[in-house]
Image (cartoon, rainbow, N blue to C red):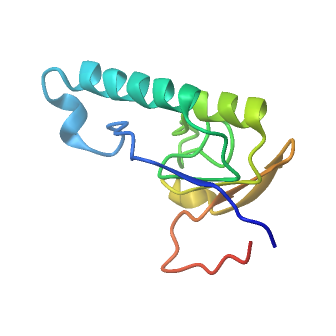
Amino acid sequence: MGKKRILGIPYIPTGFHSDDWKLPGYEELWMQYERQTEEYLLVAPSSDIILAHNPPFGILDAHFDGTHLGIKFFRDYILKNNPEFFICGHAHNYYGEKQINKTVVKNLGFRNYEFLEL
């Protein structure tokens, strides 16, 4: 088994299910943080495994009411870079696994623990 490169991405505060988004300036702060994370991903070294709180947009990311909780540039990153795994959470009711191109997206969602053999 060869070495694997792992990239951890900080939580992106979407404000969903939180009163934080009601605070003055929160939306601009969130958009700034999202832009900074996207800019970092554009220059980050390629990685085999991505660890993120938020899922990619449209992939295991829907809320109970159908609202998407995912991040669009995570999906773009996966489509462009094809990491082996993208491991996330945030969308609790979408625990599971889905393949997108060569990448396995694994949403650990609302679990107490999970053992992954990679």
Q: Residue furthest right?
A: 101
Q: Position of residue 26 (x, y in %)?
A: 21, 26
Side of 27 relative to 83 (left or right): left
In-front residue for pair 51/90: 51
56 is higher (above) or lower (below) than 112? above
Residue drawn at (55%, 28%) of the image: 43
**Residue displayed at 35% across by 22% down:** 31
Q: Name which residue lies at 86% across and 46% down.
A: 102
* Residue furthest to the left: 24
Residue 47 appears at what percent x and percent y?
Answer: 66, 47
Label tally: 0
Quadrant housing residue 33:
top left
Q: Is residue 12 above or below residue 32?
A: below
Q: Position of residue 6 (x, y in %)?
A: 59, 56
In which quadrant of the rendered image does the C terminus lie?
A: bottom right
Q: Is residue 110 above or below residue 114?
A: above
Q: Position of residue 11 (x, y in %)?
A: 39, 46
Identify the image quadrant of residue 104: bottom right
The quadrant the N terminus occupies is bottom right
Left or right placement of residue 69 versus residue 99 in this view: left
